[in-house]
Image: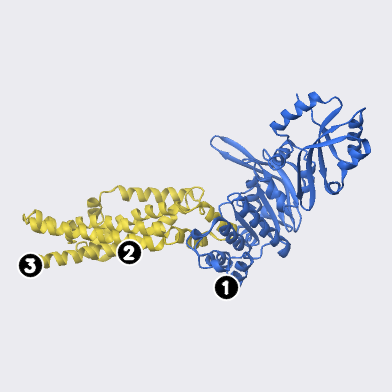
Amino acid sequence: MAETVKLLFSATRETVYMVAVSVLIASIFGIPLGVLLYSTDRGRILENSPLNKALGTIVNIFRSIPFVILLIMLIPFTRWLVGKSIGTTAAIVPLSVAAIPFMGRLTETALREVDRGVIEAAQAMGASPFQVITKVLIPEALPSIAAGITITAINLVGYSAMAGVIGGGGLGDLAVRYGYQRFMLDIMLYTVAILVVMVQLIQVLGDLVVKYLSKHR
Amino acid sequence: MIRIRNLTKVYTSASGTVKALDGINLDIEKGDIFGIIGLSGAGKSTLLRCINLLEKPTSGSIEIDGVEMTGLSPKELKEMRKKIGMIFQHFNLLSSRTVWGNVAFPLEIAGFDRKTINEKVENLLNLVGLSDKARSFPSQLSGGQKQRVGIARALACDPKVLLCDEATSALDPETTLSILKLLKDINEKLGITMVVVTHEMNVIKQICNKVAVIEKSRVVEQGTTFEIFSRPKTQTARNFLKSMFICEIPEELKAKIKALNGNLAEGRVVKIGFFGEITAKPILSEVVKKFGVNANILYGNIDNIQGTPFGTLVVQFEGKNGTADRALSYLQDIGLDVEVVEIG
C-alpha cells in the first residue's frame, strides 16, 4: 500500500510540474501570439495581412499535428533546447509547443470580443496601437484570457498523460505502465480519480479568478 | 475653426462602391455648437468621424485651427487628436476601470504625471457632478451618468473641439435634457466648439446655434438654427420639424375643417406661422377689432428656439363682405406666414 501511495504521489508531482510550467510558458508566448493574431487581422489596429496569414498558417499546422506525434517530432528540438530528450523536464518542451498556438487562438477570440467602440474611443484620444493593446485590449479581455488559461491548463493535463512516450512520467504514464500493462486495476482507478480531482480544482480555481476579474463588469 | 472643403468618402467593397459623403463644405466657427442632422444612413456620423480622421476621407480637406488634418503624419495625428474630444452614443467606457480610471485614461495616454492627473480628474468629476461616483464601475451607473463620465473623459486634455456622435440617442428624454444642459454649460464656460450629430430635432433646438441638414451624403441645407426652424427650405428639414412641431394639421382636425369649410359662406381656415418678436404682440385681437371678424383658434403651438419664440396657429376666421380675406392680407402684410388650409 505504502508503495502505491509513493508511486501515486511522485506521479502526481510530475504531472503538476509539467502542467504548471507548460501553462506558464504557453501564457508567456501564447498571449502575445494571440495579440498579434488579433491586431494584424483585417480592419484591426495593426492590420498586416501577410503577417496575419503566415502566423495563422503556422498556428494551424501546429494545432493539426496529433500530440503523440508532436512529442516524437520535437525530440531533436527538445535535445537542442534543454540538453536531453527524455524525462519530465524534456516533456515540458512539446507540451508548451502544443499549448502556445492553442493559447494564441483563445487569446485572439477573447480580444475579438472587446467592443470596437472602446478601441475607437482610445484611438480618438490619440492612443498609439501599443497603448490600445496594453491599456484597452488586454485589461478589457482579461477575464476571457483567464478563462482561456484555465482551458489550456486542463488540456495540458490531458496531453501530459502521453508524456510517458518520452519518459516524462506523470499520472497518465503510471496508469498505462501499472494499471494497464501490469493489470493493477486499483492504480488505474486511483490515477483517474486524482486526474478528475485535479481538473476540477483547476476549473474551480480558474472560475474564481475569472469571477474576481469580472467583478463589476 | 473647422473648415471642411469638398469632403468625399467612398467605401469600396466587393459588391461595389458606396458614396457616404459627397462634396461636403462646412464652416464651423469657434464657440459654435454646430448641429448635423440627418436620417440614419445619411452620412452624418461618417462626416463627424472624418473630422478626427477615425474615418479616412477619400478626398477633400479638413482644417482645424489652420491645420490640415488629412496631411498629418501618424504621430502628428495622435497629438492633434488629444485636442479633439469625442463622446459616443454607447459611451464606450472601459469596463475594467472605475469612473476615476476612465477619466484618467486620456491623461495617462497623454503622459501627464500622477499629481496632475489626480487634480484634473477631481476637477472634471466635479464639473460633471460625479465626484461621489469616482470609485464606481461603469456597469454600476445609469445611462446619463455613463455619458457624464464620457464627457469628463473627453474634456480631460482640454480639447478645443468636442465631437458628439448621437450622444443622447441612447438616453431617455429627461436625461437627454440634463446632458444637453451640461454640454451647453461647458460650451459657455469653457468656450469649446462642439459638433453635434443627431437625428433628433429636439437636440438641435436645445443647444445648437447652427445646423446643417444632411441627406443622401450631401449637405442639403444649412444656416442658423433659427433660420432652419422658421424657414425650412427642403422637405427633409420640414420633416424633421414635423417630428417636433405641429406643422402639419392632424387628421382629426382636417375632418373638422372640411366640415367647417362646407358650412362657411364667407370664412377661411388658415395656418399662421409666427416667428420672433411678433409672437409677443396681440395680433389676433387686433385683427378681430380692426376688421370685425370672428377668430376661432382650432389648434396651436408656440415654442422657443435659441431664445426666439416660434409658433403655429390654425385659426378659423369668419366675416362678412370679404372682411375675412382682408384680415388675411393684413396678417401677411405685417410679416406672418399665412396659408389658407384647403381640404377636400
**Please, which chain is the residue tagged with disc 2 on?**
A
Label 1 Cα crowd, 10 Å radius (few <14 / some 14-19 / many 20+): some
**Please, which chain is the residue tagged with disc 1 on?**
B
Q: Where residue A52 sits: x, y (%)?
A: 44, 50
Q: Where residue B330 sits: x, y (%)?
A: 91, 37
Secondary structure category for the residue under label 1: helix
Secondary structure category for the residue under label 3: helix
The residue indicated by pointer 2 is A24
Secondary structure category for the residue under label 2: helix
Mark 2 vs 3, N-terminal side: 3
Foreground mark, 2 or 1, reads 1
Whether tag 1 and tag 3 are in contact, CB under 8 A, the answer is no
User: Residue A34 vs residue B298: left or right?
Assistant: left
- Tag of residue A3: 3
Rendering quarter of residue B327: top right
Q: Where residue B331 sits: x, y (%)?
A: 89, 38
Foreground mark, 2 or 3, reads 3
Label 3 Cα crowd, 10 Å radius (few <14 / some 14-19 / many 20+): few
Residue at 92% over, 28% down: B322
Q: Amino acid at mark 2?
A: Leu
Letter of the chain shown blue in the rendering: B
Q: Amino acid at mark 1?
A: Asn
Q: Where residue A31 sits: x, y (%)?
A: 39, 59
Nearest to the observer: residue B44 or residue A208: A208
The residue indicated by pointer 1 is B118
Foreground mark, 1 or 3, reads 1
How many numbered tags mark residues here?
3
Q: Spatial distance from mark 1 to mark 3, Cα to Cα?
A: 63 Å
